[in-house]
Amino acid sequence: MRTTGLNAEQIGTYVHQSTNGLVSAKWSSRPLLGLGCQEVARVEELEHLTGVPTLRCGTLWAMSDVLSINSNLYGAKRRQWCPRCYEEWDDDSYEPLVWSIDIVCSCPAHGCDLEHACPHCGAVQHETYRLHRRLCCRSCGRRLGQGAKRRRRPSFMRWMNSQCLELVEFCATPKDAPLRWSDYLDFVAGVCLSASSHGGLGPHMRGFLQGTDQRVRRQSQKPTVRTLLNLCALQSISMSELLSAPRESSSPLLFNQWAGLNYLPLPSASQARWIYVATRCIADFIGRRSPYMPPIGSFAKPFGVNLPALRDADQELCRSYEDRYQRQGSTSKLGSLYKAYLYCNRKMRRRPATKDAFTRASRQVAAATAIGIKDASMVVAGSFDVRDCLSDSCIGAYQEELTVREALEWLLAKWEASRVSHCDRC
């Protein structure tokens, strides 16, 4: 505005007309990421209007042909900030681009945690809030530039943080053209070829690569930052290596960096929270000492989580569950009990209220599935214990214990502990 002498409304109208209506005339205080055709057009018109050809270096324009517009991990359009930076803010200050990548968890300048809620009232801060009012909470009005904290993050999260900084550094370097889609296509094809010749990847890693390869070839979906991080982790390279030399960095490298983990591809933050809820419900169910336990895969099915990821999150818990399950009988007996369990879930909607009703229900299960009355009684009791542990009230309470961001940090910390334990045993 200082350069052009125009106000925000006039600039918005000019850009709208110059792009033949592609860009909205409404001015927004939302960070300009330079992703998507509208934001690319906005960046180019602003460069033309101001005469500054490097405005694109303050955005992710260099990744605009490759990176998805929805390029976040936590799925929330909320602002995050560094309290120390806000404390030192003056009239010439600005919010750095790296704050717009919600995977980044610490300030590169001060090393303290990036906050995403008011330390006084806990209110989240909208990213569209006016720049000159961002130093104070939109809800309680108190200053946000205080209470800086430093937490020790899991090593994988610190690695993610450093890779995002490399991504921003790549975009901050002046370039004539963005990274080409064909270069990313060649990289993914090379990684898939290396993985097929390696032969030691788990099914979920292979599934992740196959899905990524299909989307690239069909150009049906651009990758998010999370996808790029997973590819770098699987290939054991840095983000700068991927971006600077995509073809060369896809050659066969180290695929065994994550020994001790059964499931590497980083899940979404919402998946991480479901993994947390699943572990809490499993712990509750074990504590009930129910007379019958179904297979752990059946218990965890409502959460939609992958068992390898669940086992990596809490190996001791899953091992305890599976040991107790195996002690219920031989393979054939376990199959018969599980068949009766499925029948009970399908046919019986309410827990028997009296002893006589419970006996009738047990006889019904025994007659329908050809098991003994004693085993049928165990299955009926176990079936309703599972339902109690998986009730909406229990699941909802556990969901409220952690935000999606906190759940991902919890999962990564669990994974790190799992890897350290594995390395110590080796």
Image (cartoon, rainbow, N blue to C red):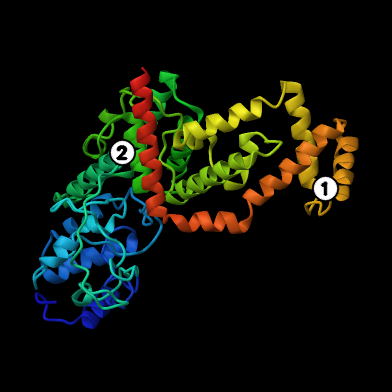
Q: Residue flagged by tag 1: what amino acid is it?
A: Lys
Residue at image location 18% in from the left, 82% down from the top: 7
**Viewer-closest of 239 and 302:** 302
Depth check: 192 or 255 in front?
255
Amino acid residing under circle 2? Phe
Q: Which residue is mark 1?
A: 347
Q: Position of residue 226 (x, y in %)?
A: 36, 45
Labels 1 & 2 near each other (Cβ < 8 A): no
Residue closer to the observer: 136 or 171? 136
Q: Secondary structure at mark 1?
A: helix
Q: Could you tell me how far apart the alpha carbons at marks 1 and 2 are, in whole angstroms?
A: 46 Å
Q: Quadrant of the C terminus?
A: top left
Along the polypeptide, which appears first: circle 1 or circle 2? Answer: 2
Q: Nearer the viewer, mark 1 or mark 2?
A: 1
Residue marked by disc 2: 156
Quarter of the image with the N terminus is bottom left
Q: In the image, what residue occupies the spot 37% across and 26% down? A: 421
